[in-house]
Image (cartoon, rainbow, N blue to C red):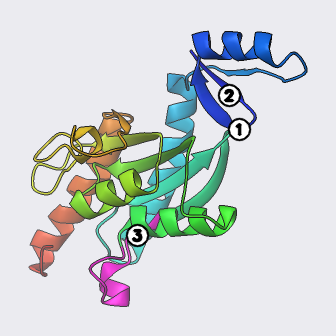
Amino acid sequence: MIAVRGGRAAYHQGCEREKTIVALSYCLYIVPMDLERRQHFMRLALDEARQAFEEAETPVGAVVVFEDKVIGRGHNQTERLHDATAHAEMIALSAAFNYFGDWRLQDCTLFSTLEPCPMCAGAAVLSRIKTIVYGVTDPKFGACGSILDIPSEKRLNHHVEVIGGVMEAEVSELMKLFFQQVRKNKARIN
């Protein structure tokens, strides 16, 4: 269990110790996010992915959540913007930066329908995201355990918890449908 005192996270034992030192301070316990809540936010990311699908983009969607509130959302826009960095996660992270007016996203969770690539996983680590939750693994570009494991890289000064496989079947179905259409139309595959 994690405790938050004055906006800073501390392990449960540390919070108890701090309460004895600062008697007037409060201590709020945050229960880890349960599966039902993870699925709720992954559905919102999946809605973003469907929007990308409708725009003929690779159907990846993402949301950033803080205290059970979506503070950033995005879907892939690389083709529309002609920008290789216009990934769903980057757009959602940018919206979250704007929400806080800061680049630090401590105590936030990034939900993505697809395992983040090296760029997106690196941005999550740099922004101090607490947790990355994703739907399906990416065997070609995945950087949260598939090919690389940037969030757990021991040489970095910040590490991110990673939870994969949330609503995997639903996300996988949308990805398969998209790539079937791409192959049928013989359009360029990313």
First in residue order: circle 1 vs circle 3? 1
Report which residue position mark 3 lands on: 52
Q: Is residue 168 above or below residue 83?
A: above
Give the secondary structure at mark 1. Answer: loop
Residue located farthest toward the front when viewing the structure as drawn: 21
Q: Are marks 1 and 2 in contact (CB under 8 Å)?
A: yes
First in residue order: circle 2 vs circle 3? 2
In this rendering, would 108 be left or right of 130? right
Q: Residue at x 32, y 74 (%)?
A: 57
Amino acid carrying mark 1 in the image? Gly
C-alpha separation, residue under disc 1 versus residue under disc 3: 35 Å
The spot of residue 156 in percent (x, y) is 27, 46
C-alpha separation, residue under disc 2 versus residue under disc 3: 36 Å
Of tags 1 and 3, the one toward the viewer is 1
Please say whether residue 77 is one of the residues in the magenta stretch: yes
The spot of residue 100 in percent (x, y) is 67, 61
C-alpha separation, residue under disc 1 versus residue under disc 2: 6 Å
Amino acid carrying mark 2 in the image? Val
**Circle on res. 4:** 2
Structural crowding at the residue carrying mark 3, measured as other residues with C-alpha within 10 Å and reported as few (<14), some (14–19) or many (≥20): many
Of tags 2 and 3, the one toward the viewer is 2
Q: Residue at x 78, y 15 (%)?
A: 21
The spot of residue 14 in percent (x, y) is 61, 15
Q: Start and end of the magenta stretch?
A: 74-86
Please say whether residue 114 is one of the residues in the magenta stretch: no
Q: Nearer the viewer, residue 2 or 189?
A: 2
Give the secondary structure at mark 2. Answer: strand
Report which residue position mark 1 lands on: 7
Q: Residue at x 63, y 70 (%)?
A: 98
Give the secondary structure at mark 3. Answer: helix
Q: Is residue 44 above or below residue 61?
A: above
Q: Is residue 156 above or below residue 177?
A: above
